[in-house]
Every structure is written in structure tokens, then in C-alpha cells.
Image: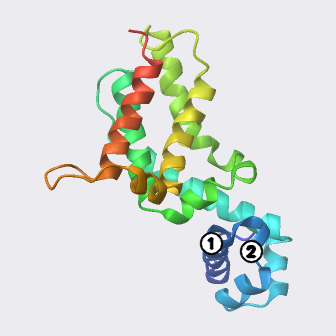
């Protein structure tokens, strides 16, 4: 069983691992480098996390917890599920935009799906509530729509430089490309799920 992350060495290991996995991916990350960066030996790392995969899971669990905490602290408007969905999506995007390491971890796809289920599930609940109230299309699969919304955000943030290179220049009075993308992505999701 991994140590509680109140242990200073465990915190240092997870922080070093997060940086290494985000930079090099699961396959390219080196346990020796993580141990060196954390100031511990490999044996201690394996004692705590048992394997590279166990350490990766600890990093994903911590990252998912940070995202879930940020979403839980949201002051949701009193409006219907679509208004709360709009705010949740915007907040999720802003949170991810501030944490490129988390974006890289989510972008690793198959290895990170289960860890980010709480963030997706929050969207699923809003979508299902909207279906119950007739505000969200009945033919919509809430799980699929929630996952697609997360992919839309992560995909942009992961490839922001490519998108920026292909975008027309912005005027001095226009919002940043990132802000425009966030608004357009949120509008796209909300319009796509709306029953009206």
C-alpha cells in the first residue's frame, strides 16, 4: 500500500515522478531519474510504490484529486444544469490551462482514464440531471459527452502551439486565443447537448 502523501519523502517522490512522467511519458520516464530528483534511492521508491506503474498511478491519483478539489470548490450558480455545466467546463479548462503537467498526464490516454473519472463523472451528473429536466437531449450518452468535453479541452491545451500557428493574428482588443477557444469549446459542448 503506497504511503500517505503527508510523508515528506513520498511527496518528493510523487512530485519528481509527476515532472518526469509529464515530460517523458510513461514509457520514457526513468525510475533512476525520479529517485535522483526526489533525493532518495530506487529501493525506497519501490518500497513505497512497488513498481513504475504503481508510482504512475499515485501521480495520476494525486492529479485527479487536485482537479476534483478545484471543481468541488466551485460556487455553482443557482440556474439549471446547463448553466452549471457551462461554469464547470470553463473552470475545468482554466484549471487545466494552469497545469501543463496535468494536461500531459491526461494526454497519455489509456494509462490515465480511470484516475480522471471523478472529473468526468461531475459532468455526467449535470448532463443526466439536464436529461431528467428535458434540457439535455435524451439521445445523448452522458458518459461519452463528458469524455468528449474533456478531450476537447485537453486536446487544445496539448496542441495549443499548433492551433496558434494556424490561427489568424489577433487584434489588440481581442481576447487571447486560449480565451476564445475556451468560450468556443464550452459553447460547442453546451449547444451540442442542449435539447432546444
Q: Where, quadrant-wise, is the C terminus in this rendering?
A: top left
Side of 60 relative to 28 (left or right): left
- Under circle 2, the secondary element is loop
Please tell me which residue is depicted at 42% across the width and 47% down the height of the picture. 93
Residue at the disc numbered 2: 29
Residue at image coords 60%, 74%: 19
Give me the residue at 66% from left, 65% from top: 59
Which tag, 1 or 2, sits closer to the chain's start? 1
Query: Is 178 or 83 nearer to us in this picture?
Result: 178
Location of residue 120 (image quadrant): top right
Q: Residue at x 66, y 75 (%)?
A: 20
- Residue at mark 1 to residue at mark 2: CA–CA distance: 8 Å
Image spot of residue 133 (x, y percent): 44, 10
| Relative side of 1 to 126, left or right | right
- Element assignment for label 1: helix
Residue 142, horizontal then vertical, whole percent: 58, 23
Query: Which percent across, then down, holds residue 62?
Result: 61, 61
Q: Which residue is more in the foreground, 176 or 45?
A: 176
Whether label 1 touches label 2, CB < 8 Å = yes
89 relative to 138, above or below: below
Q: Is residue 63 left or right of residue 91?
A: right
Residue ID for mark 1: 23
Amino acid at each position: 500500500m503506497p504511503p500517505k502523501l503527508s510523508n515528506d519523502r513520498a511527496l518528493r517522490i510523487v512530485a519528481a515522478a509527476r515532472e518526469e512522467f509529464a515530460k517523458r511519458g510513461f514509457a520514457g520516464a526513468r525510475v533512476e531519474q525520479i529517485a535522483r530528483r526526489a533525493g532518495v534511492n530506487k529501493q525506497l521508491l519501490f518500497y513505497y510504490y512497488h513498481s513504475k506503474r504503481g508510482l504512475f498511478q499515485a501521480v495520476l491519483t494525486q492529479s485527479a484529486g487536485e482537479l476534483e478539489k478545484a471543481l468541488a470548490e466551485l460556487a455553482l450558480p443557482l440556474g439549471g444544469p446547463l448553466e452549471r455545466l457551462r461554469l464547470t467546463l470553463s473552470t475545468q479548462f482554466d484549471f487545466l490551462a494552469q497545469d501543463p503537467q496535468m494536461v500531459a498526464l491526461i494526454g497519455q490516454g489509456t494509462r490515465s482514464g480511470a484516475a480522471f473519472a471523478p472529473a468526468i463523472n461531475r459532468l455526467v451528473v449535470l448532463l443526466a440531471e439536464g436529461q431528467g429536466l428535458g434540457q439535455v437531449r435524451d439521445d445523448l450518452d452522458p458518459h461519452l459527452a463528458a469524455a468528449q468535453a474533456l478531450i476537447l479541452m485537453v486536446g487544445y491545451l496539448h496542441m495549443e502551439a499548433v492551433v496558434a500557428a494556424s490561427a489568424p493574428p489577433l487584434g489588440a482588443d481581442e481576447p487571447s486565443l486560449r480565451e476564445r477557444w475556451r468560450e468556443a469549446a464550452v459553447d460547442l459542448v453546451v449547444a451540442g447537448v442542449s435539447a432546444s
